Amino acid sequence: MADGPALEEVLLARDENATMVWGIEQTVRMPTGDPRPGAEAAAETLAFRRPGSRPR
């Protein structure tokens, strides 16, 4: 087993009404292999996909 910083962190939440469990990524692994807060990665992805946000 190798020791080092966490590359991914997932919060599990149980929804008893829907009989489901949700996995919410708090820290995600980027293509470079580096960890990054999930909220930052999601905001960057949404900004990229918004119309008019891409350079022409």
Image: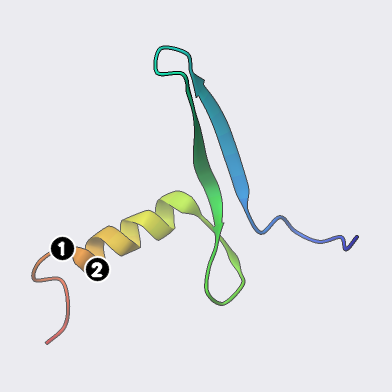
Q: Are marks 2 and 1 in contact (CB under 8 Å)?
A: yes
Residue at image coords 63%, 54%: 8
Residue position for label 1: 50
Q: Amino acid at mark 2?
A: Phe
User: Vertical placement of 18 versus 25: above or below?
Assistant: above
Q: Image check: 55 left or right of 12?
A: left
**For residue 7, what is the image quadrant?**
bottom right
> What x and y, as percent, mark residue 39?
42, 50
User: Vertical placement of 39 versus 21: above or below?
Assistant: below
- For the N terminus, give its image quadrant: bottom right
Number of the label disc, if any, that sits on residue 48: 2
> What x and y, as percent, mark residue 14?
52, 22
Residue at image coords 52%, 38%: 23
Q: Secondary structure at mark 2?
A: helix
Quick one: 14 or 49, which is closer to the camera? 14
Residue at the limit of the structure toward the left, as seen here: 52
